[in-house]
Amino acid sequence: MAFTIETYATTAEAARAMGADARFLAGGTLVMRDVNAGDQSFTRIIRSTDPALTAIRGTGDGISVGACVTLHQIVANPDLAFLAPVARQVGGPQVRNMGTVGGNLFAPHPYGDFTVALLAIGAKVTTAQGQKPVDDFLRDRDRSGLVTEILIPRPRDPGSFGWHKVSRTKPKGASVMSIAAYLPREGGRIRNVRIAFGAMGGHPLRATGAERALEGQSLDASTIARAAAVTLEGLSPPTDPLASEWYRREVAAVHLTRLLTRMERS
Amino acid sequence: MGKTPVTLTLNKAERAGFTDPGENLLNFLRRGLGDLSPKYGCGQGTCGACTVLIDGEPQLSCLVLAETVSGKTVNTTGGLADGAQLHALQTAFMDGFAAQCGYCTPGMLMAAKALLDRNPRPSRDEIAEAISGNLCRCTGYAPIIDAILAATGQQVQG
Amino acid sequence: MIEFRKDLFADERDDTLNEVGKPTRRQDILGHVTGRSPYFDDHLFDGLLHMRAVRSPHHHARIRRIDTAEAERMPGVVRVLTGKDVPQNLNTLLSLLDFGIDDEPLLSTDKVAYRGEPVACVIAATELQARDAVAKVRVDYEELPAVFDVEEALKPGAPTVNPVYPKNAFVYHGRYDHQKLRFGDVDAALAQADHVVEGRYQMSPIEQAPMETCGAIAAPEQNDRYVCYTSTQALFFSLGTAAKMLKMGSNRLHFIGGTVGGGFGGKVDSLHEPMAILGASLTGRPCKFAWDREEEMQVGAPRGAERWYLTDGVMNDGRIVARKFTGYFDSGAYTRLSSYAIIKGVGHLPGPYTIPNVHADVYCVFTNRTPATAMRGFGITGVDFAIEAHMDKVAEVVGMNPIDLRILNAYRDGDMKAHRRLAKNTALIECCQVAAQKAGWSIAPSSQAAASMKDGGGARAALPAHTVTDQKGLVEGFDSGSYAKKAGASAPPSPSSAQPNRPTPTPTPGQAAPAPAQARPAPQTAASSPDQPRNKPNRFSSLSGFRRR
């Protein structure tokens, strides 16, 4: 396409400039890839130099992350240490220096590992239309408009958040699947559990069956077995060059068991 | 289609050129400024052959919109040597047979330089992590890691 | 760490090597580490134009109409090429060696037979402009039934993929729809074997995935010549192909290559050069035609898929007395190098073993998949996987240590191979012995005592008394005097067509003889030494057979 590049000083102006013929350029790892491939679906590239987009700040019980904060900045920020293992497994160093938290929300399958963690932790996404949970955002992400910030709740116990990525090559490889589990506990019982899977659907999805099996229980081998038995509920794994639907279905429970067992023991 | 002027510091030299809207930094460096050292391998952020340092950070030039580097500092393998004096990484790659077809080498060198600039004595695992965004298809990871270790003056095992 | 086993074959070496085992710098490495090695794309031309192909979204379709009008009006577009612009729009790479029939267009005009097949090519000022114009080329397709499985493709009634070969099989020697190997009498030997072991093995296509994608830049040069910088692995194949398809004397083509960003076989039969030179000749300007990564993966010719059926006749003591192969190479939509891969592969059968009765039927099959080509040991690697997996299966059936089974059946110097040449410079036994030792795998004393230089030849050097032949798969309508030509087809003159036909390697039918070749004398008891000295390797030409160096 014969592109026009529009750069705005504030997110408000940039948000107004968005439209069906426009894409917002943050780190470039998604948008420039489409530009290079001759994507015919957009003609305008919107940028913003608003410093709010690259800021990380505490908000009491959570952390506000500007949409253009890179994954490298997440790794380097002590306040977000519980998410560092997730961010460290997105792409290679170059991609982490470029790719942003906001962009990751839009990453097509099998990418978007960081969003899996955001979904499990119960983050909220701020767009021009206001704030909404990641769950709702993902269902309608193609029409969301400009994302400006992501609000990440701070887990009281960092050990209640767990992360497991399955890839064919290490240390860098796209996900066969990724799993993020948030298991807050009150008096030994799991309360408000959230488990999210990546690469097991068109976008990150919650494992509703496993959540139900864990809710209100203590984390032990028999609970884990009951959760594993219903792992696939809520998920719709695709076939792609990394793995078949059959394979993903076969191994999902194995990997969930590994993650939960590791969390039980730590 | 209007062209946009871009000025930057490329390998310690002030450079300027015009870029087409949508042109990536890799094309701009190669065809606009004549620095042919970064390579095209995929255009989608998978291979790392186009890795350059932007303000010291390794990035993929094929995914950078050229005009966004205006006013920034870009370093490529084309400027790694100091005149005729090769960089320690270059010598180590030569001595350690750390290149076969050579196409991934400029990107590997930039990823390695970024690592050594912030961590002069990395471990083997840290090196593997630092070059994990760079593919090599002639099966050269082990000699490449050995060469980077050697460039830091560390003992290469095996 | 490399270990040199100088105890093995010590008398064959004088150990005056000056470089082996010592560190050395590659001659081209200074260019690599400074980013100055000149790959095809590292040449700057003022006013360079960029070419992008319009590709079929279908696996198999008839082309009703190609409308380039809107694309030609797009910004930056200089010209849109279609098949009518190509002077000789049909080619097969090995026609340069008088092997095979032209079967593949540069830009298809009548139909497409694989997804990604090029039907037009846009030339524009920038790559993005070329991509935008590609999106505006309208192609009216009529989809056809497609076939993706080699055995399905050979069944009667399967859709014809490649009109040059209506039955979807390459024609060998102008006579058969498969390449034959006949040595002894396999069926009789199988009937007398203690065990019959069957197996089916399959390999998927493998993309070479070089770091540098395929491409070429061509530009008008002085004296009515064109310079062409290319990523090719085979400069003179590319030169010959370009000269043929452009009907241009090769002395007008100045090809520069040799600095290749990885090839692994995938850059042997590239068609970028004729496309780039065609662009340069029609626009008068430098033109670049290069694949992006998606094209490299989708239309870049991979190592083809193979399927093999093996049947072994085995005696209780582990001696393999018969081995039968039926093989299918998935050539994709066009021949490229698969026909040759089979010639090479069949010459390799039955693997590095001395087996007195061997039979192979190997088909080069056309399917609606990406055309296949060379990759690292192609023609050999796939069937070797099948053979070695099968050896393990045989070992299990007869209850034998798999390494002992291999050493027992391994060829020795002086043994007759199924392609009727004596084995020389064999070393499988020593490889097995060292591998067993390194793996801590114990082998029988007789295997420890075995050696490639011992116990070969003699009766093991004899040809079978009787070889069963047949006319299965005989085809009509092809000129049997050459390797594969359509009868009466006017082939472009080539130097070899003026020469007498080469003998075909198909065995001549022998006189009737009742018995299959018996199991060769067991290696432990045979005592004769190889009847030819080592150290004088033959040079093998796949097309004309062996020649002494």
Image (cartoon, coloured by chain):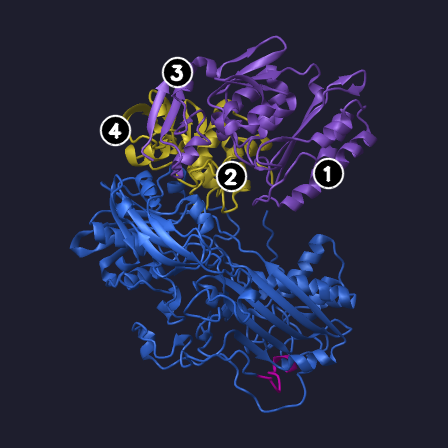
Chain colours: A purple, B yellow, C blue
Answer yes or no: are tags 4 and 2 on the same subunit: yes
For residue B144, the mark is 2
Residue A109: image quadrant is top right
For residue A13, the mark is 3
Answer yes or no: are tags 3 and 2 on the same subunit: no
Q: Secondary structure at mark 2?
A: helix
Residue behind mark 1? A254
Q: Give the residue type that dot 1 points to.
A: Val
Answer yes or no: are tags 1 and 3 on the same subunit: yes
Q: CA distance from mark 2 to mark 1?
A: 35 Å
Q: Chain of mark 1?
A: A
In this view, the mark in front (2 or 1): 1
The stretch drawn in magenta includes residue C305: no
Between residues C374 and B18, which one lies in front from this camera angle?
A: B18
- The spot of residue C98 in percent (x, y) is 37, 72
Residue beneath the point at 41% across and 25% down? A19
Q: CA distance from mark 1 to mark 3?
A: 48 Å
Residue beneath the point at 45% across and 80% down? C476
- The spot of residue A216 in percent (x, y) is 79, 22
Q: Give the residue type that dot 2 points to.
A: Ile
